[in-house]
Amino acid sequence: ETQNNPTQLDMFNPESVTSANFIKGRPLIVLIHGYTGHRDYAPNPTIRPAYFAYDEFNIISVDYNPLALEPCYLQAVRNLPTVANCTAQLLDFIISSDIIPLDDIHVVGFSLGGQTSGMIANYLRAGRLKRITGLDPAKPLFVFASNEYKLDQTDAEFVQVIHTDVFQRGILHPSGHTDFYVNGGVVQPGCDATTMMTTGECNHNRAPEYYAESIGTEVGFYGYRCAHWYLYMLGICRGGGPNDQIAIMGAHTPNTMQKTLKFLKIDIEQAVATSQLALIDSAQHLPQGHGGSVRCNASSHENTQGLYGALLSRRRPSNDTLCGISCLEKPYRCPHPRIKFYLYTRRTQHTPELIDVLDPESLYYTHWNPSHPVKIVIHGFGGGRNLSPSPDMRKAYFTRGNYNIIIVDYGSAVTEPCLNQIEWAPRFGSLCVSQLVKYIANHPRGVPPDDMHLIGYSVGAHIAGLVANYLTPAEGKLGRITGLDPTIFFYAGSNNSRDLDPSDAHFVDIIHTGAGILGQWSPGGHADFYVNGGTSQPGCASSTIFQTLACDHTKVTPYFIESINSERGFWAGPCPTLISYLLGWCE
């Protein structure tokens, strides 16, 4: 009755819940969206219509959009316990009011919502949920989180997880009683470079689409048991044998599966899935379901430590749940006062000279020497010209010889506590850096882009790659880009117009030290070096997870700096894939 006119359930007004049009005797489905989502965003537009087309259901869409706004992913993760607490309060009230019994409640969460669904167990007083379905639960910041802060099989009597994007946005390790890895959880049908979305985003979004189709399909998606994910990827576990254990994936997976199957793989062929998914895409325009926003009372036992210990250990006011602001001021045009270019030479190591790209005379007033190599260094989130790695890198280069070293300082635009601007600012920042490159290339005492070497750390690596978008073939191509553990945040896809890739310079080399956690896993250059397999760097074991991960990520800069003057160097051997190395096949 309320598909087109959902009721907002407000715990500050309990009557809004008791007077709502719940259908007694029918199950309650609780849908929780992911990062940047809302009640009419995945998984809602596909799953709600599918349930209503199948039978009568009560559906609540949890809308926490103001707590998960772009570009503040870190803050969104921090807010998840609050979302889980509010949802648990609502469910406790529904159960205690004899509206819906606990055993008839099924929580379905997508991406960040998948992890949130697990956290509900921390706050639900009525008992243990009967069933949770996690749709490609989010990976960034959850790989090493304790079970209290992510989905795991203790959160409900039966936990089903559907993995569709394990290399990028979704988590790889099994989290439920039954884990389905669709096509290995890697590449989904119809997700390639020609789609409007990035490949990773497309793969990730397939999870709610598969689940929605599973509700009313007469065929079903079947998976077969495989002991480990890597056995499937190596082709050892392909199924089809007479003794293979199989299970149906999605809405009709029986709760008894927890007793028989643990790791499941499922193949969806292109010819079958694309036509079925076309029906799902068209369902996005069907009437919306019984959903609404949920508000809750503040709990006296609310988690004050935040997620993952030291990751967010700074004390903040209890009402500070929304992201702070440290955005660039308008107008958004280059040059911008928060993006500055400082020239260092051997003679001016301690007295850098500011380059004004609007002043043709500016370069004449500096100690710029066109006969010396040009290095343009771009720091990462929370960095600056006087913060690592800039000072040590300058010192190492000047120990070696004469250089023109330009530090791109945009530190005031990417400050804590939020990963503010980490997706948008690089695109704008790269435009300003390209203005610098063109200024030098067109100057009478300048050098062409082909003779420039850009060095970017973390998000700075992507800025370096994005500069190529603004250079025409007539203007030249960057000579070299070195990416120092390019960040994975918002850059986990394969969209070359946004990520650092081999087409951005004549030579692109990348050093990975925090691969898959804070740094990118996938190769992005002509040469990709995975130091110690790309993670677990020497000296990085710490008492806290965040310090260990941060150490792995930052370890890339001392490696590169040491390589500048090392008499021995760091040597690597070729390996076709990172998985081959991790399996010990490339020693």
Image: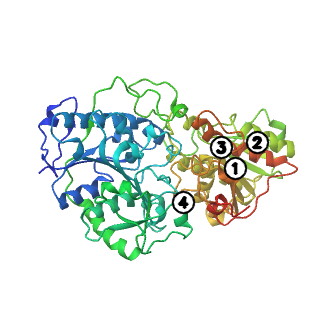
N-term mark: 4 or 3: 4
Q: Which mark is residue 455?
A: 1
**Disc 2 vs disc 1: Cβ atoms closer than 8 Å?**
yes
Q: Which mark is residue 497?
A: 4
Q: CA distance from mark 1 to mark 3?
A: 18 Å
Q: Position of residue 176 (x, y in %)?
A: 41, 51
The amino acid type of the residue labelled 2 equals Met
N-term mark: 2 or 4: 2
Which residue is located at x 15 percent, y 40 percent? 99
Q: Which residue is mark 2?
A: 393
The amino acid type of the residue labelled 4 equals Ser
Q: The C terminus appears in which quarter of the rendering?
A: bottom right
Q: Which residue is mark 3?
A: 552
Q: CA distance from mark 2 to mark 1?
A: 10 Å
Q: Is residue 442 visible?
A: no
Disc 2 is placed on an element classified as helix
Mark whose residue sits in front, 1 or 3: 3
Mark whose residue sits in front, 2 or 3: 3
